Image: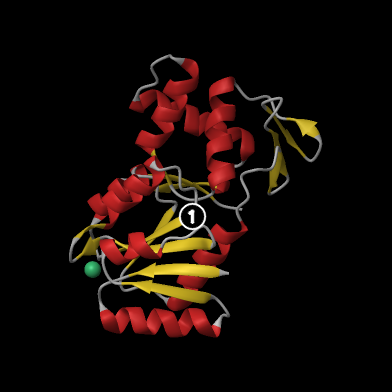
């Protein structure tokens, strides 16, 4: 498994490299936007991306890669308390983030979760709930779950991505498919109904950011 590590803090970069190598990941390092672009190849399976880089912004780089069609999971490394960076990063197509200083074990478990993801499946099962992506139906332990179309779409987005989904990204997803305006308050209502149907503990609220599926 090859990971591209983009971080300009040499001490942190060294520590992360050592940690990742111990876990048998292959690490490709970059310390700025330019070298990160040069190092990005199709065999990279995960990108760890610092936001503040000497020659640019990790969020812009992420957005650029997504525009170019890159689907590799991107994990942002954000500075402490920069909630705005988190929201920007996720909206730019990032999949998850860790806030510095982070615990190494937490970082490794986030990395494993992102690498396990496989969005190409037509059916996906989490915590006993199965989504049939071709029929747009959900079931729990084989029994159909009565969801509205909007609830299904929210659930599908949360379950299949498993990373934190911002409220804006959810609203975008709903808008795209329904061409019907779902506002912020309506989204909260849909989420609370969905929680009643699938179990409240599975849908975690990330304050000020959005929601995340929890197995
Ligand atoms: Ca930095």
Residue 119 vs 152, above or below: the answer is below
Which residue appears farthest toward the right when viewing the image? 142
Residue 96 vs 105, above or below: the answer is above
Looking at the image, residue 10 sits to the left or right of residue 170; the answer is left
x and y percentages locating residue 102 in the rendered image: 37, 72
Q: Which residue appears at 25% of the width and 65% of the height?
A: 79
What colouring does the structure picture have?
Answer: secondary structure
Q: Which residue appears at 43% of the width and 73% of the height?
A: 28
Check disc 1: other Cα within 10 Å, few if <14, some if 14-19, many if 20+: many
- Residue for badge 1: 73
x and y percentages locating residue 124 in the rendered image: 69, 43
The residue lying toward the viewer, choosing from 137 and 206, is 137
Figure quadrant of residue 11: bottom left
Which residue appears farthest toward the front when viewing the image? 38
x and y percentages locating residue 136 in the rendered image: 67, 26
Q: Is mark 1 within 8 Å of ligand 1?
A: no
Residue 168 vs 13, above or below: the answer is above
x and y percentages locating residue 125 in the rendered image: 71, 45
Q: Is residue 86 visible?
A: no
Dividing the image into four equal quarters, which quarter contains ligand 1? bottom left
Q: Which residue appears at 56% of the width and 48% of the height?
A: 201
The residue lying toward the viewer, choosing from 210 and 90, is 90
Q: Which residue appears at 67% of the width and 32% of the height?
A: 133
Looking at the image, residue 75 sits to the left or right of residue 56; the answer is right
Q: Secondary structure at mark 1?
A: loop
Q: Quadrant of the N terminus?
A: bottom right
């Amino acid at each position: 498994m090859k990971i591209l590590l983009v971080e300009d803090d040499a001490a942190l970069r060294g520590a992360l490299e050592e940690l990742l190598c111990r876990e048998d990941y292959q690490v490709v390092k970059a310390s700025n936007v330019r070298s990160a672009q040069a190092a990005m190849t199709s065999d990279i399976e995960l990108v760890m991306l610092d936001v503040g880089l000497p020659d640019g912004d990790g969020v812009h780089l992420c957005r650029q890669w997504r525009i170019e069609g890159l689907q590799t999971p991107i994990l942002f490394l954000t500075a402490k308390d920069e909630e705005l960076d988190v929201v920007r990063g996720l909206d730019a197509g990032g999949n998850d983030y860790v806030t510095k200083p982070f615990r190494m074990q937490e970082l490794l478990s986030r990395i494993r979760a992102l690498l396990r993801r496989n969005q190409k499946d037509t059916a996906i099962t989490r915590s006993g709930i199965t989504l049939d992506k071709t029929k747009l139906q959900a079931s729990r332990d084989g029994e159909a779950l009565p969801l509205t179309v909007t609830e299904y779409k929210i659930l599908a987005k949360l379950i299949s991505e498993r990373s934190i989904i911002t409220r804006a990204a959810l609203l975008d997803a709903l808008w795209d498919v329904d061409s019907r305006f779902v506002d912020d308050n309506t989204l909260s209502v849909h989420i609370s109904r969905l929680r009643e149907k699938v179990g409240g503990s599975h849908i975690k609220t990330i304050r000020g950011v959005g929601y995340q599926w929890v197995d």
